[in-house]
Amino acid sequence: MTLYSTSMQPITTITEKCRKCYSCVRSCPVKAIKVEKTYAEIIFERCIGCGNCLANCPQKAKIITDKVGLTEKLLDGSQKVVAVLGCSFPAYFHYLQPEQLVSALKKLGFSEVHEGSAGAEMIGYSYAAAIEKSSAPLISSHCPAVVDLIERHYPELIGRLTTVVSPMIAIGRYLKMVHGSDLKVIYISSCVAGKFETQSQEKA
């Protein structure tokens, strides 16, 4: 099965499944999909990771590129690996009690499990300071899809974005500060745009 992907593309097209029905093209709010080959191709320079193409493809030709293999490799290695659960985990893992999920992740090899919502508490004071200092309305930088939307499509609004990092980045930096920069942090979330954000941080 041919996949149109590289390691830096969070959404993958299964080319054999694509029927060029244009459903994904019509559903994309930022015109980030083109059909020039035998399949609908994502223009990643325009993509904001909203996930509309995933939900609207009748053939299920668009899928999220997983990093299960990379995670398993890290867990089998000698470095300490910590799991951080995105804020949506109670809904996504609704069939488990939180303590059951933590136990399962530790059995897989994660040394610690944290809630991503703790990152929101860490950046609360920064938001308060930014709001107090600004005389104009600000746009929250909490959501990576919103940040990408502004940076890629509405650059005139970049000055309105708060310069505060997202909760995901905040807790990741905190954990690395506590355990050392060689710590591996795996963020478990249903947010597609979060994949774009983690990759932009890796390249920074």
Image (spheres, grey):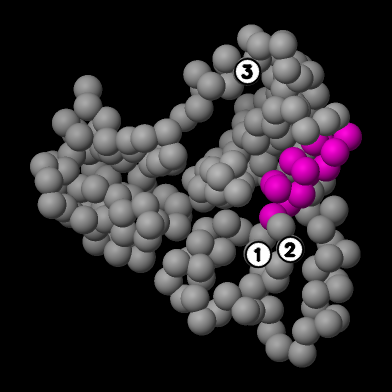
Looking at the picture, how far across and down is residue 197, in whole percent? 57, 49
Q: Nearer the viewer, mark 3 or mark 1?
A: 3
Residue 138 percent location from the top left of the image: 68, 79
Q: Is residue 168 magenta?
A: yes
Residue sitting at x 70%, y 48%: 169
Numbered circles on residues, count = 3
The residue at which mark 1 appears reads as: 141
The type of residue carrying mark 1 is Ser
Q: Amino acid at mark 2?
A: Val
Helix, strand, or loop for circle 2?
Answer: loop
Q: Amino acid at mark 3?
A: Leu
Question: Which residue is identified by label 2?
Answer: 164
Mark pair 3, 1: CA separation: 30 Å
* Residue on which disc 3 sits: 74
| Marks 3 and 1 in Cβ contact (< 8 Å) | no
Q: Which residues are magenta?
A: 166-178
Residue 65 or residue 184, whichever sits in front: 184
- The question of residue 184 being in magenta is answered with no
Q: Earlier in the sequence, mark 2 or mark 3?
A: 3
Q: Quadrant of the N terminus?
A: top left
Residue 104 in sight in this render: no
Q: Bin the neighbour count of mark 1 within 10 Å (Cα to Cα): few under 14, some 14-19, many 20 and up.
A: some
Which secondary structure class fits the magenta region best? helix
